[in-house]
Image (cartoon, rainbow, N blue to C red):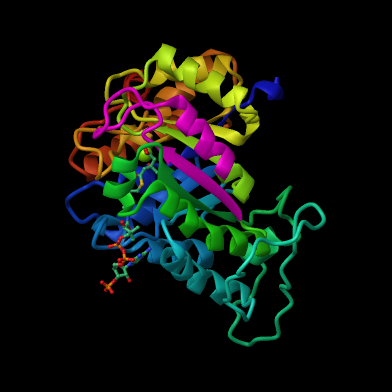
Amino acid sequence: SSRDAVRIVEVGPRDGLQNEKKVIPLATKIELVEKLARTGLKTIEAGSFVSPKWTPQMANSSEILEYVLRNTPQSPTPITYQWLLPNVKGFDNFLKLWNAQLSTGQDVYPTSPPSPGPEGGQVLNTSSKDPNVMPSATSGAEAMGKERASSSAGSPLHEISIFTAATESFTQKNTNCSIQESLKRFEPIMWKAKEMDLKVRAYISVALGCPYEGPDVDPHKVAELAVNLLEMGADEISVADTTGMGTAPKTAKLLKTLDAAGIDKHDLALHFHDTYGMALVNSVVALEHGIRTFDAAVGGLGGCPYSPGATGNVATEDLVHLFHSLGMPTGVNMEELSEIGEWISAELAKSNESSAGKATLAQ
Ligand code: HMG
Ligand code: MG
């Protein structure tokens, strides 16, 4: 039944590519997004607005956003695109392009949280007379305003993702600040996003093991952070096993701890990396705890630049095969997805890391 439908957040174009040492042509990145959009996937994290000194591979994400805004990639269902950013500078860079579409005319950050208003928050004024504004028939403005909740047209939606981590060492290595400082950085982003009716996803890295502090990360720390981020206004928390150190018992313990902290399972996504080959097992544990949103990267691409030795995300093909085997619809075409995994692996001169993808193609 549709009650058992699962939502997959395809993070291949961002998490999958960010760690590649060789420069990947912009055309290849765009082709990846376009191909993924056609498979039935509904959410794609397409790039990040981080410092190019820290993660050079993502330096042309703005061009990917521009492309998506100008040429809505074809898709059987409307796609939500997510854009990762660590600070106001990244959000500004995102908004520059976004505002070229929306023309809110003001790029000012609120200095305090928005006062609680009617559900859905403030709707943007999209009827700008500014001649510089692109025609908005397929613009995100329409999608964000009128059709925010139930988009039936082909207009893509856009969301942003912020990220912090469950350990101080990882937060320092990844974003050059403490956990507390990272939360402070998010406040103006969160307030501005609320004002714009833009959804915010928040990642918590190293939730099941840290490359610097070891495999035993305190689940209560993860819960405390998740509660904090939700109270700040995050719409979803993606709990990330950055290092792949997660196991079935650890995953169960973490999910129980999050539940005990009062966190609604519908506000959670799980983000597994498959470094130890445990991602599918952990996904089943998460399913049993009622989690229905999972991050994955086609072909098992990926690795975090600040997590030495961490390999790819769980392959999207493997997750889709798992969910389908359990009778849980994903809306994703397995054959098409498997071909993309094979294609992008060849483009990157890497081996295809998806068992289910390779098996599907061999049939
Ligand atoms: P910093 O060096 O402390 O930043 O880096 P700063 O504020 O001192 O600025 C230094 C320079 O960077 C300045 O430029 C800024 O303008 C520029 P300069 O004056 O020297 O020419 N700058 C930026 N440029 C573009 N976009 C920006 C930006 N911010 C500053 N947003 C910072 C701090 C947070 C920026 C840096 O540490 C950073 O970018 N970190 C991101 C690293 C990253 O990409 N990590 C991978 C993504 S997270 C992940 O993969 C985990 C996840 O998948 C879940 C999981 O599996 O765990 C999500
Ligand atoms: Mg990741």
User: Does any portion of residue 187 appear in the rendered image?
Assistant: yes
Q: Quadrant of residue 15?
A: top left
Q: Is residue 16 left or right of residue 227?
A: left
In this view of the protein, which residue sits in the foreground, 162 or 152?
Answer: 162
Figure quadrant of the N terminus: top right
Compared to 145, does 96 lie above or below?
Answer: below
Instruction: Residue at 70% x, 81% y: name it.
Output: 128
Compared to 196, does 255 lie above or below?
Answer: above
Q: Quadrant of residue 62?
A: bottom left
Figure quadrant of the C terminus: top left
Instruction: Residue at 36% x, 34% y: name it.
Output: 206
Q: Quadrant of residue 154?
A: bottom right
Instruction: Residue at 25% x, 46% y: name it.
Output: 19
In reply to whether residue 224 is colored magenta, the answer given is yes
Number of numbered markers? 0
In this view of the protein, which residue sits in the foreground, 61 or 219?
Answer: 219
In reply to whether residue 190 is colored magenta, the answer given is no
Q: Is residue 231 left or right of residue 54?
A: right
In this view of the protein, which residue sits in the foreground, 162 or 218?
Answer: 218
Instruction: Residue at 28% x, 28% y: name it.
Output: 353
Q: Is residue 340 left or right of residue 106?
A: left
Q: Position of residue 101 (x, y in %)?
A: 58, 73
Q: Position of residue 98 (x, y in %)?
A: 54, 69
Q: Is residue 182 left or right of residue 278?
A: right
In this view of the protein, which residue sits in the foreground, 141 or 293?
Answer: 293
Compared to 145, does 174 lie above or below?
Answer: above
Ligand number 2: quarter of image: top left
Residue stretch in magenta: 199-228
User: Does any portion of residue 284 appear in the rendered image?
Assistant: no
Q: Residue furthest right?
A: 118
